[in-house]
């Protein structure tokens, strides 16, 4: 998000004169972007799950006594094997009894079925992470982010009116906090892991891959 940018210091211009019912239409506009981000994340996660079945030999998932060699660890944003694939390390990690991660040399190549699909999956991993991150970031209830409009329209009944210049100043303050502290990044990181874990568990459960 930091690299690509998305209107950092000012909100996306919206002509509220076109709103027939201000609160309702302002809410719909506010949730449109985050809803699209979440839909893209959801379907990208489906693609990641499907690719996982093509990349690895089926017998790998039947190995006993090898914790982390399961579908979820390869697809979860905080999984050891997800990180290995995401960063291009290309090592298969298992968990020792003392809690430390280790890998078995040659195991990655032994159970890899379609190597070139790793690059495709890595692209979708990035795409899913970016879209979920954008969705949750924009849901922060801080002006001028979409989350502020959602809170204002639903809970405050549209009573809070903040001038555009003040919103711009608040956005700059948010950026300063983001760069100066880890509070926002830690909050978003935990939220991303929580939401992705829930969605991934649901998809794996539906297809009997959990």
Image (spheres, helix red, strand yellow):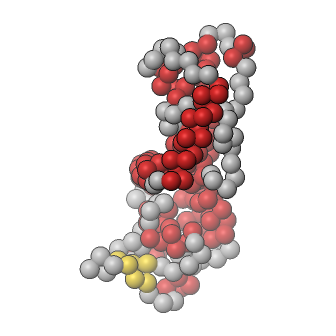
- Where is residue 26? Give x, y as percent: 61, 20
Please report the residue visible at 63 percent of the width from the left and 71 percent of the height from the top. 118
Please report the residue visible at 42 percent of the width from the left and 73 percent of the height from the top. 69
Viewer-side residue, 118 vs 84: 84
- Where is residue 68? Give x, y as percent: 39, 71
Q: Where is residue 33, by image quadrant?
A: top right
Is residue 145 placed above or below 193 in the rendered structure?
above
- Where is residue 49? Give x, y as percent: 54, 59
Viewer-side residue, 175 vs 5: 175
Please report the residue visible at 57 percent of the width from the left and 72 percent of the height from the top. 87
- Where is residue 132? Give x, y as percent: 55, 47
Is residue 3 placed above or below 31 in the rendered structure?
below
Q: Is residue 23 visible?
A: yes
Please report the residue visible at 40 percent of the width from the left and 59 percent of the height from the top. 210
Q: Residue furthest bottom?
A: 105
How many numbered marks appear? 0
Q: Residue furthest left?
A: 98
Viewer-side residue, 89 vs 119: 89
Viewer-side residue, 112 vs 189: 189
Is residue 204 placed above or below 175 in the rendered structure?
below
* Residue 117 placement, left or right of 38: right
* Residue 128 placement, left or right of 74: right
Q: Is residue 132 visible?
A: no
């Amino acid at each position: 998000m930091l690299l690509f940018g998305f209107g950092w210091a000012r909100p996306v211009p919206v002509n509220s004169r076109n709103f027939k019912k201000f609160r309702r239409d302002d809410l719909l506009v506010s949730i449109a972007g985050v809803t699209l981000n979440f839909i893209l994340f959801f379907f990208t996660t489906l693609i990641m799950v499907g690719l996982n079945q093509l990349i690895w030999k089926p017998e790998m998932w039947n190995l006993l006594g090898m914790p982390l060699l399961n579908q979820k660890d390869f697809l979860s944003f905080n999984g050891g094997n997800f990180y290995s694939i995401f960063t291009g390390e290309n090592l298969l990690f298992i968990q020792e009894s003392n809690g430390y991660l280790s890998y078995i040399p040659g195991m990655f190549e032994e159970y890899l079925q379609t190597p070139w699909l790793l690059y495709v999956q890595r692209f979708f991993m990035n795409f899913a992470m970016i879209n979920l991150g954008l969705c949750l970031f924009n849901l922060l209830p801080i002006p001028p982010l979409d989350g502020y409009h959602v809170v204002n329209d639903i809970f405050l009944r549209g009573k809070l009116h903040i001038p555009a210049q003040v919103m711009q100043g608040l956005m700059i303050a948010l950026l300063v906090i983001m760069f100066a502290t880890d509070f926002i990044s830690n909050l978003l990181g935990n939220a991303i892991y929580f939401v992705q874990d829930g969605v991934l568990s649901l998809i794996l459960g539906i297809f009997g891959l959990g």
